[in-house]
Image (spheres, grey):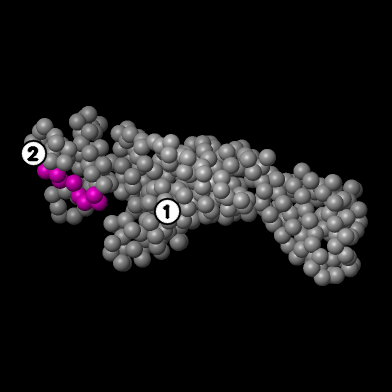
Amino acid sequence: MITDRQASILGMVVDEYVQTAEPVSSKALVYRRRLDVSSATIRNELARLEREGYITHPYTSAGRIPSDLGYRFYVEALMAEDQVGLDERRTVEHQLHQVAGGLDEWLSLTATILSSLVGNVAVVTRPRMESVKLRNAQLVELTRETGLLVTVMDDGRVRQRIMALAEPATQDTLNERTQRLNAQLSGLDAAEIRSRLDSEVASGDVATARAIADLVEEQRIAEETFVEGMNSALRQPEFADVDRMLEAVTQLQAYRLRSVLEPAGDESVGSTRVLIGSENAEAGMQDWSIVIARYGDNDAAGAVAVIGPTRMAYHRTIPRVRYVASLMSALLQEVRQ
């Protein structure tokens, strides 16, 4: 267990290293923080912190940098969050409400906005639905023998498929068919639609109803991840070396984002999780940290995350990830209504 003074010094080391990306020496701490103690005293405390595993030497140097354990202690016990200001909130909310499209446009824009807020890679996953229901369907005549089936789900998302028509049909005929099917199937999920194929759907409409059920089911299991800000992350001092930059790009491209963004244990919507360096299960990602927040509700939930070097501004990143996740929860509810 470290003393209060050692904890305070650790906090200074983290803050200095996050700001400068340079190993922090006892002399630098005394000078920059205007400490009323000698550099020898600070040096002794740094040595104790290093023995306890909270800081380390990156190489032969008078300076130290935080270890993963040091960052963890900082996040849990020392950090004062830089809350999202009113002007920042207004700007973000204005940007999101300018989008005229559906959920996917919001998700993509959210990743872009979050990346710009924190200067690292931002990730937003499409919410996974326990149940997706049909809002309405439309068949558009392409030729006399083929039509474009367009389905709109209860979350506002659209899926479409070109399908062969059992017999030639005009657009008026197709409109009548989808009008009947919408009256019968709107508000149902894929299983409920299939349960009505033999009993309630007219024989001439069964093929279209089955195709609608398939599209609703495809939407339920669809997975997509929106990623923005790779260039921002690679402008960090850690990647000034070209080989290190290429290695970082390879790691991020190969990383199974969706798997790590799945809820851990009993993690609930609205919760925030931080993975620091070696806490990542994949060895290739142990120079990175990830801040993850869940959004949505019990019926549909996704994740908002930021990925960056372990020298991340956690005090700024964590509240912004949490804030953006809360916005996404509200937007998802709005779309589904």
Instruction: For marks 2 and 1, give the CA distance.
Output: 40 Å
Q: To which residue does mark 2 refer?
A: 40
The three-letter code of the residue at mark 2 reads: Ala
Q: Is residue 206 left or right of residue 335?
A: right
Image location of residue 42, percent across then percent down: 13, 37
* Residue 262 seen in the current view: no
Count residues near mark 2 (Cα–Cα under 10 Å), then give few for <14, some for 14-19, many for 20+.
few
Image location of residue 184, percent across then percent down: 85, 46
Q: To which residue does mark 1 refer?
A: 121
Give the residue displayed 88% in from the left and 65% down from the top: 169
The three-letter code of the residue at mark 1 reads: Val
* Residue 109 seen in the current view: yes
Image location of residue 238, percent across then percent down: 29, 57
Q: What segment carries the magenta color?
A: 20-28
Count residues near mark 1 (Cα–Cα under 10 Å), then give few for <14, some for 14-19, many for 20+.
many
Judging from the image, what secondary structure is the residue with disc 1 in?
A: strand
Q: Is residue 144 left or right of residue 261?
A: right
Q: Is residue 95 left or right of residue 4?
A: right
Which quadrant of the view contains residue 151? Answer: bottom right
Q: Earlier in the sequence, mark 2 or mark 1?
A: 2
Give the residue displayed 20% in from the left and 49% down from the top: 23
Q: Is residue 139 above or below residue 24?
A: below
Judging from the image, what secondary structure is the residue with disc 2 in?
A: helix
Query: In front of the other: label 2 or label 1?
Result: 1
Give the residue displayed 19% in from the left and 31% down from the top: 5
Residue 96 marker: none
